[in-house]
Image (cartoon, rainbow, N blue to C red):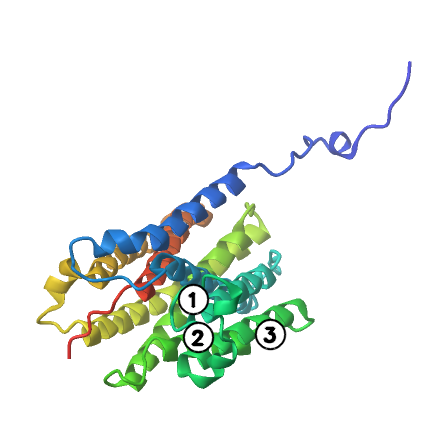
Amino acid sequence: MTLTKPSLAESDGSAPRSGPGVGPAVAVVVLVGLAALVPLLGPSAALHGTGEAAAPGAGGIGLLRTVLFAALCVPVGELFVRRLARSVPGAPLPLPRSWAPQAAGAGFVAALGLASVVSTGNLVPDSPSDLDIGGLYASRDGKLALLEVNAFAVAALCALSSRPATQVWPLAAVVVAEALRAHPTTEHGPLLGSALTLVHLTCASLWAGGLLYALRTLRGRGAGETGAAGAALLGLYARVAAVLLAVITATGVWSSLRRMPSDTILGQLTETAYGRALLAKVILVVAVAALALWARIRLRRAADPLTACSPARAEVVALGGVVALSGLLTALPVPIRW
């Protein structure tokens, strides 16, 4: 009889572990593909019957802006939740691998694509010869586009360094550049508009990116010390997220009223492309808020607080749709009424 040495899984009585399934990866790819269709196909659907004309390459610009927003949310959320994790009592909570370098790379590519459009006078370039890189230094929009390109490059280097927390500064530069870009100097009260966008974008990045990283941290956590620490982390995030939602709602409503005054907003929500996309975003945000409330109730009342992860995962998917709609909004004509 030949004696064989038992494997480690057999010796401790546990079943051998299987490799990671492909189901979640496929689901992520499908969801990302669906989210990409929103800015790509959204302009034609939103503009239908309004009499408005879309800017050249509106779908591509909306997609690039969506990638840029998502690339901003991921590292900002990671920094936020990592800071929260240090406040969790008990056993230290193992944190997942950072996606910040990949996000910064995606943001760099998106910002580079948007800068190429700015260099051609907001026209989609047909060939490299159409690009006027030197002309970017001569305009406000060009300088802001270059700032975003450089900021994502620096953020990638910071994320790969021994001090990843330093990426907060280049990421803050991206937020400031986006706030200034969205409100040109020709607009009435541009500083107020930029301030509202700055706060809105910061809070939205903390909310969406923070929830994504929190759920990645809680993945596979069961009962025991790590499970209790995971529930505590989710509870800390939920308390901050409630404040973030209130600020996002207030700044979003204020910004909308600046562009669509109260006496015209109801008509513009259905008669303009910007209004239709904004209405879709509002409906999705309401759904996100309902899912967040459901998760909070489960977190407080369920026997296993980590069952709150189920509605929270649906919340992340809905937030992905909100990010895609935000990218679409930047590509549509703004119905300014002064």
Mark 2 = which residue? 175
Mark closest to the chain's N terminus, 1 or 3: 3
Q: Which mark is residue 154?
A: 3
Q: CA distance from mark 2 to mark 3?
A: 14 Å
Instruction: State whether residue 298 is above or below residue 176.
Output: above
Classify mark 2: helix, strand or loop.
helix
Q: Position of residue 58 (x, y in %)?
A: 34, 60
Mark closest to the chain's N terminus, 2 or 1: 2
Q: Position of residue 152 (x, y in %)?
A: 55, 71
Kind of residue indicated by mark 2: Val
Disc nearest the viewer among 2 and 1? 2
The outermost residue toward the left is: 263
Q: Nearer the viewer, residue 162 or 158?
A: 158
Classify mark 1: helix, strand or loop.
helix
- Identify the residue at image location x=60%, y=76%: 166
Mark 1 = which residue? 205
Disc nearest the viewer among 1 and 3? 3
Instruction: State whether residue 193 is above or below residue 62.
Output: below
Residue 290 appears in view:
no
Kind of residue indicated by mark 1: Ser
Q: CA distance from mark 2 to mark 1?
A: 10 Å
Q: Which mark is residue 94?
A: none
Marks 2 and 1: CB-CB under 8 Å?
A: yes
Q: Nearer the viewer, residue 320 or 334?
A: 334
Q: Quadrant of residue 334?
A: bottom left
Q: Position of residue 9 (x, y in %)?
A: 74, 33
Residue 109 appears in view:
yes
